[in-house]
Amino acid sequence: MSVSANDSPKMNLRAFLAKYSVLIAFAAIVIFFAVASPTFLTLANLFNVLVNNVVMLAIVALGLTIVISSGGIDLSVGVSVDMASMVFVMLLAAGYGGVAGVGGGLGAALIVGILNAILITRLNISPFLATLGVLFIGQSTQQLATSGGQPIYLTSGYAADQFNAIARTALFGVPTPVIVLVVVAVAVHVLLHRSVFGRYVQAMGAQPGVAWYSGIRVPRELSLVHMLCALLAGVTGILLSATVKSYVPLSGNAFLLDAIGATFIGTTLSRERKPSVIGTLLGVLLLAIVKNGLLLVGWNFYWQQVGIGVLVFLVLAASFGLRRASH
Amino acid sequence: MQTAKSEIAVSMTDISKRFGPVRALDNANLEIERGSILGLVGQNGAGKSTIIKVLAGIIRPDSGTIVINGETVTSLSPPSVEKLGVHFIHQDRLLVPTATVGEAVFLGHEIGLGPFVSRRAMERKAADLLKRFFGMELPSGNLVKDLTTAQQKVVQITRALAQKASVLVLDEPTAALVKREVDSLFDVLRRLRDDGIAVVFISHYMQEIEKLCDRVTVMRNGTDVGTVDPRQTSIDEIISMMIARDVGEMFPKRSVTLGAPVLEVSNLRLGGSFENVGFNVRAGEIVGLTGLLGSGAKEIVQCLFGLKTADGGQVKVEGRELSLSTPVKAVRDGIAMLPEDRRAHGVALGLSVRENISLASLRRYSRGGMVSRGLENQAVDGLIKELSIKTPHRDALVRELSGGNQQKVAIAKWLSCQSRVYVLDEPTVAVDVGAKVEIYNLLNRLAGEGAAILLLSSDLLELVGVCDRVLVVYRGKLAGTFSGAAMNSDALLAASSGARTVKEAAA
């Protein structure tokens, strides 16, 4: 690995392209849609993208970023979203207040995380299989609890007030969900990149054997990782219910693949392919803008998935391929 | 040599191979005869495994001639060597655990029609072969993982024979076997020899060499120093051929006054591995620990770091009794471990020098759970300088460092913890000679600062050169403690090979 004067400009260009493939893709896509659709670059549209497409996905993806940093995966984030949403709405429907509803919802999500932690650290099941199992169990649980998957709509004035207090308020003109995202992003950034816990997470992800041989309490730290991820997914569940004023069973799964995609797009920012908060946020923005842009230029909903698939493929391939060539 | 030319199966002449500054093979010769069992002995690093890897086509020699079955071969690769009838039973390359015996025997040479494999035909044929060669009734539909280690060896040998092997090379085949299995393996090898197959047997166990081999080639410092008949040459003579006398300045001298015992181990035992192990390491003392693979020496070290939980016994550090059930506790109680597998357990290659060095001691550089980069950088820079770790900067990835410098990072991690007891597991494996000397200097300095050091090593010269005392483990028991003039490679090798039973040697 030489960083010497004889590196040709062409090699440097390749390295540059490899490193910033996400940013370049981002810029290209923004320009493309700005030209293709007159409404794309309007403040109203961008605001809509931020509140409706970015915030909830980003919070789930930030939780997954912690898990993926530790070398694991959580396929049950959708279940955590749904559980929080379900318990929150059910508590409101039973006449409990907003605080109890939010607390109960987050608690339900946390239980999913604790279940994952037990399966992974006590029973030594691989994160992939453990969280896949929890995904199946969680889906059935919801169907059993809602007589086969009936949505719960809350239309009472009381519930609407509670929902609006979360989803429709703003502080200095910034909507509450956006503030929640900012707080979560800063917290996860500090936790992952500045704290002792974050360093342990990085070590477990880089080489679990070294973490264990360095006296790190790997089971404990991994448990925390999975509980945090589930809790963040739960935050999204609350925001989701408050926004749509209902609980729709199994709706959380829509976040899973997008969140994984966003996190991995974000890893292309780092030479060692480590997930990061900034990378994940960029990945989420990229996916949200593509979805929105394709909608604006009139693409069918089903084609959006194709567009996102191609995008993920291109960004990762460009980053991997160019980086290999530049070394 | 009275042998006719046609009886020589393999002849390797003037083979040389360098790895960077290290001369692994220096004009080495090896001659393998048909219908004879050749022992190949030498210390670690003598070149045994390198010359075998050259023959296996895994390593390409810099120069030399190889003649197999009268034909001079210029370029070897693992498949081409097998086609020439030379087969290897490697020490650690095991069979696919979930294959059946039949599948394992015909792995790579499956029987069947086109792309379709007939497992039943393979199992029937494997059963035939096992019966014919070894008189063994092994249900060939059994899975490999359900067989004993000895049975797996036999399956590996059968695979070689199924492909008409004329030369069979076995690398430490008895390391994991019990006595009875060793005897039946020897019967198998003798029968093969009588059938005219050339057998090469690599072992550290001198008694086995004496019992089994017709000839023994001794290697030292990358070359062959002689081939003898073990029935006419004593084990002591063979051992003295193996040991180089010119130790030179590889091992820096030191003079330290020893303090109070820091590590006290008594009655430690682990079922199936070792029993009744007791010893002390004093402040400033470097105590060596050695034993052959499977002797239990490794497991003693693993118990001290909580990687395995001992069944009984006591471990004290500075008078305090420890419960060593996990590395978490061992680290907290001041025990540092330099593991043998550096890449899996010692340093995280994908993390920076800084992140690796501070990993075990982050609490010292943090406030309220947040890492203080200032404190961390200061400590890390100090250690990089102190150990003269060659790295472009503290944030360079450990992957980019040389093996010796990676090992220094692993040591720095524990210096940062201010550990009192250092347990080192083969710390100089796969580092070059210059880095070795630096690591020895480092050990001396650690000891000089009052640390207690336990050095597990199979490099006898290293043990003699570095340690104040050496404990030898043989088949699960402390077979002797050597110090002063009694601590020499001959005595250590003899004790660890079980050639002699040695009483506690006086200093």
Image (tube, coloured by chain):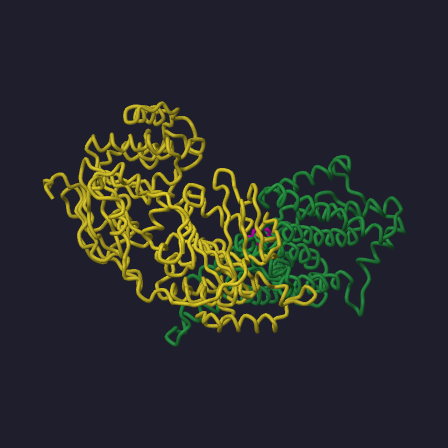
The quadrant in which the N terminus of chain A is found is bottom left
Left of A313 or right of it: where is A287? right
Q: Is residue B504 above or below residue B155?
A: below
Residue at (34% x, 49% y) in the render: B493
Left of B122 or right of it: where is B277? right
Instruction: From the viewer's side, name the closer residue of B144 and A62.
Output: B144
Instruction: From the viewer's side, name the closer residue of A277 and B506.
Output: B506
**Residue A124 location, x and y as percent?**
59, 43
**Residue A28 showing in the rendered view:** no
Residue at (28% x, 49% y) in the render: B239
* Quarter occupied by residue B198: top left
**Total count of labels:** 0
Dominant secondary-structure state across the stretch colored magenta: helix
> Magenta span covers which residues?
A304-309
* Residue A307 lies in the magenta-colored region: yes
* Residue farthest to the bottom, as pictured: A5
Q: Colour of chain A?
A: green
Q: Is residue A319 above or below residue A219?
A: below
Left of A164 or right of it: where is B498? left
Instruction: From the viewer's side, name the closer residue of B242 and B499.
Output: B499
* Residue B388 lies in the magenta-colored region: no
**Residue B502 location, x and y as percent?**
38, 46
**Residue A45 location, x and y as percent?**
70, 63
The quadrant in which the C terminus of chain A is found is bottom left
Left of B482 or right of it: where is B393? right
Residue at (32% x, 26% y) in the render: B130
**Residue B421 location, x and y as percent?**
53, 59
Q: Colour of chain B?
A: yellow
**Residue A163 showing in the rendered view:** yes
